[in-house]
Image (spheres, rainbow, N blue to C red):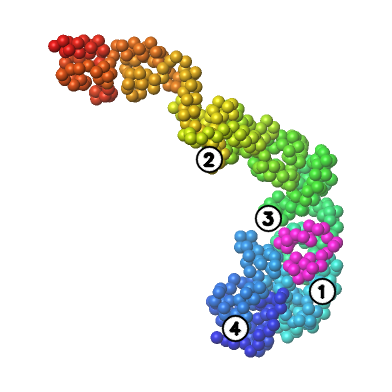
Amino acid sequence: MKNLLHRPRMYADESLSGFLIRAVQDLYPLYYIYSDLELYKNLKTLKPVNYNLDARELSQKDLNCIATLLRINKNDIEKMMLLNLDSKNGCYQFFNTKAHISSISTLKAKVCPHCLREEEYFRKIWHHINVSACPYHGCLLIDKCLNCGKSITWKIANILKCNCGFAHKLAESNIASIECIMLSTLVYQKVGLLTKRPIELNNFFIDAELSEFDDTFFLLASFIGELRSRSQFTRSINEIASIQRRVMDILINWPMGFHRFLNEIRTKSDEDNVERMLSSFGNFYIQLKRDRRNSFLFLAKEFINYLFINKSSFCTSANFSRIVNQFEILILTGQNALKYFGVTRRTLMNLIKACEVEGMIVEYGGETWIHVTKNSADQYLEKKRKMYLTKQEAQDYLNVGYKCITDLLSKEVITFSNDVHKNMIEKKMLDQLLINLVNSIVVKEDVNLVTFDKASPSILGVTDGDVVKFVLSGEIIPRGKSTRRGIKSLLFDRNEVSEFFNNQAKKSIGELHSTADVARILKVKKTTIDFWVLLGILKCAEKDKIYGKLFFPDEVRQFNESYITVTQLKNLRIKLKEKISASFLIKKGIVPVTGGKKNGERTYLFKRDEVLELINNLSII
């Protein structure tokens, strides 16, 4: 492993590449260090084309190599680098904040001669393309050698000295404009190198994150300097300073400076409607609309204010201009507003008319435009979340099934809101329902308690909604409360509930017998009764949707007098020498009306008079 004779002291704001230059101290070529790195071993050229390591993704092996060679900690190395913080959005870790990759120059470089005279090392802050002036010395940074005129780039092994031998710390610099100094001061302040705040600027620009401010700044700069992309912001330092002065003039004189800028970029000034007016701003308006990172919210808000001032037909209410100025949040319009609220166009219009959200509806050009403030939208959605529930949310809140909620609504135990929140249920209504159910509990000891689910006998067609209604009316009294949540926490006396529902059934069907009643009278299964009805032997009076088949008592009595089963015959306790069974009767010549495997019903049914006549004859014998 190679060793260096010298290990310089690190500075808090120093870049890794600049630190390596100081480490070799002209005793070795810089390639002495780089040749051991995996990053450069596969290069076809003998020397690197770019000596800047600050933004490179170094392997752990390379980091260990540099740490061992310079006898420093790997964490200290990473502090001097520009780590890829967010690969999706393309951001570097830049001091204590993040900066977009396109805001950092890793090939062309610029330095402050006065800073180098004080301490000769490369400051990492100089990588940022918006730093064109030194806030400490009030001068423009230099980007060319004062001796030979060549650009200062990282293609040169020693960024602090030109290939012609001229040390950049000996160069003379030009005085920077107030605007460029203010801009550099703002960048220094955002990364934590300065605490001074440029009081001439709007608080938004001072408090915004560096990446957000850069997006706003370079959007304006692209239209002032006719730059297609941020990467073109690498012209000479004087050209860059000229563009920066014009952008800072807009920011310092906010908002009137921005309004003047909009007037300058408009292609026409006599548009007769809003659509054409928006199109007159061309690509600038498109950039605002395509803002995916919400970096242009402040610009977009003031852009709308500009439209209000310069196009009265855009807004028919002066009150709405006050609303826009009240919030420093972008106004939601059209489909964006509908998606944000998750409602239909008609519902959102009703919300605005009912003053549930702050906004307005504008009619022009045969179309309806909707505008609401995002802050107002957030307040409404939070209020809606706390005060209203959908059917599915109400289901979870009451801890019941979806059918129960539907049943409660159909029986008007609970109702939908009658205001603009259609198809929503007020949360306080559900809270009151639960309070009323709990207050109806009368504790009873030593009883067989059952849950809410089992208290609703499905055989009688009683729904969960019926049970809740019976409890609220006092017809059924809960006798306890379990640890379960919502309605299902109620406990009932099984005997009381059973008796209540039996009485309810009797009231509903009157004097008619149900299938269960007939089966009990004839001492057979309910399936047997259904089979006899199917054969037409037993006639039912009607078929009820809830209680099923119903029978007239006279019809059941007449059937019982006409037919008999073996079970009924055994209950007569007739004494014969042979055991009474279906096979016995068949052997004696009694033909069954139905029964056996062939008929699909095992219960044999015989004519009563034929069986009794046979029994009498056998008794005489």
Q: Separation of disc 1 and disc 4 at Cα?
A: 34 Å
Q: Separation of disc 2 and disc 4 at Cα?
A: 71 Å
In-image side of 272 versus 230 (left or right): right
Q: Give the structural element (helix, strand or loop) at label 3.
A: loop
Identify the residue at image location x=39%, y=13%. 553
Of the two numbered discs 2 and 3 on the same chain, state the one appearing first in sequence: 3
Closer-to-camera residue (505/69): 505
**Residue 544 percent across, percent down from the top left:** 45, 19
Q: Which residue is mark 1?
A: 136
**Residue 159 percent across, percent down from the top left:** 70, 79
Q: Which mark is residue 69?
A: 4
Q: Which residue is mark 3?
A: 293
Mark 1: amino acid? Tyr
Q: Which mark is residue 482?
A: 2
Of the two numbered discs 2 and 1 on the same chain, state the one appearing first in sequence: 1
- Eye-nearest disc, 2 or 3: 2
Q: Residues within 10 Å of mark 1 (few under 14, many from 20)?
A: few
Q: Please provide the residue range marked out in magenta.
A: 186-215
Kindly indicate whether the residue at mark 4 contacts the one at mark 3 (C-beta within 8 angstroms): no
Q: Give the structural element (helix, strand or loop) at label 2.
A: loop
Identify the residue at image location x=86%, y=57%. 253
Kindly indicate whether the residue at mark 3 contacts the one at mark 2 (C-beta within 8 angstroms): no
Closer-to-camera residue (514/300): 514
- Eye-nearest disc, 2 or 1: 2
In-image side of 566 versus 530 (left or right): left
Q: Give the structural element (helix, strand or loop) at label 1.
A: loop
Of the two numbered discs 1 and 4 on the same chain, state the one appearing first in sequence: 4
- Eye-nearest disc, 3 or 4: 4
Q: Separation of disc 3 and disc 1 at Cα?
A: 33 Å
